Structures are given as structure tokens and as C-alpha cells.
Image: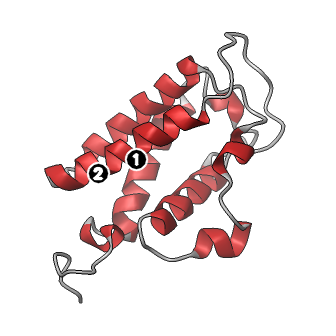
Amino acid sequence: MSDPQAPGTSFYEQVGGHDTFKALVDEFYRGVADDPVLKPMYPEEDLGPAAERLRLFLEQYWGGPGTYSAERGHPRLRMRHQPFHVNPDARDRWLLHMRTAVDSLDLAPVHEATLWDYLERAAHAMVNTFDDAPGAPRRSLL
């Protein structure tokens, strides 16, 4: 097993790899499942497929396996979120559930700050409307 603090070790490895990202995504989707704004954005009754896509994306982004791109191509996050009504309220709800998930991991402060910085910037970048009226999703996220 490699030393997670060794130079050149990916963030993915430093924070615990697959198990950490699975725990993050599972906790996040527990919140989404009961959210009246976010849940309707997921056409599948079971959030499992969306959770897997998010986990694979995050693992790849942070230096883990490239499964996401192998299965789905380039992430194209803005394009994939365009069919959805992502306004500041949806962003803030997403961040609320993700904050709970990040806090549940008990990461080292530097890792927590690094991960949170990315997630917060990504959430702000996905906002595609300032309209308060919800829009119907046409396909699943990520």
C-alpha cells in the first residue's frame, strides 16, 4: 500500500480513495432524496444511478480511476446541467447537502478545505438561471 503523504500521491489516495468518495456521495444523496427542489431534478426514482455518476466523476477529478470518462465521455458539466433549472436556491440546497456530506468524512483540515473549495466553485458555476420558477428536467444529472 502506498504512503498517502508521499509526494506525487493523488488527492484521491490521500483522502482514502473509493471508500471516502462513496461515503461522501451516499451522504449527499440522503439529503437530496428528501429535498423538494433537488429530488425532482432526478428522473430516476432510485437515486443510485445518479450517485454512481457523481462518485465516478469525483473520483476521476481527484486522481482516481478514469471510469467516468471511459463510460460517459468528457464531463461537460455545464452542458449536462443545462436542461435543469439550476438557480441560486437549487445551488444553495446542493451546497447544504454537500456540506453535510463533507463534514461527515472527518477529513484533515487541508483536505476538507481543498475539497470544499472545489465543490463550492463548481456549484456556483452550474447556476444557469436566476428565475425562481422550477423547470422540468429532460435528462439525468451528470
Query: Could you tell me residue 57's position as x and y percent?
Result: 55, 60
Instruction: Determine which residue is flagged by label 1.
Output: 118
Query: Could you tell me residue 93's position as x and y percent?
Result: 49, 25
Residue at the (61%, 58%) spot, across then down: 53
Q: Is residue 121 above or below residue 108?
A: above
Residue at the (33%, 50%) spot, across then down: 115
Query: Could you tell me residue 33's position as x and y percent?
Result: 55, 34
Label 2 residue SS:
helix
What amino acid is labelled 2 in the image? Thr
Residue at the (46%, 65%) spot, across then down: 59
Judge whether residue 105 can be spotted in this image.
no
What amino acid is labelled 1 in the image? Tyr
| Res 22 → quadrant | bottom left
Q: Is residue 28 left or right of residue 12?
A: right
Label 1 residue SS:
helix
Q: Is residue 12 or residue 53 the one in the foreground? A: 12
Q: How crowded is mark 2: few (under 14 residues within 10 Å), some or many (20 or more)?
A: few
Q: Is residue 2 above or below residue 136?
A: below
Instruction: Residue lying at the far right in this picture: please name it.
Output: 138
Residue at the (42%, 43%) spot, across then down: 119
Tally of marks = 2
Instruction: Determine which residue is flagged by label 2.
Output: 114
Q: Is residue 53 or residue 81 the one in the foreground? A: 81
Q: In which quarter of the image is the N terminus?
A: bottom left
Badge number at residue 133: none
Judge whether residue 74 can be spotted in this image.
yes
Q: Is residue 139 or residue 43 the one in the foreground? A: 139
Instruction: Residue lying at the far bottom in this picture: please name it.
Output: 1
Labelled pair 2, 1 in contact (Cβ < 8 Å): yes
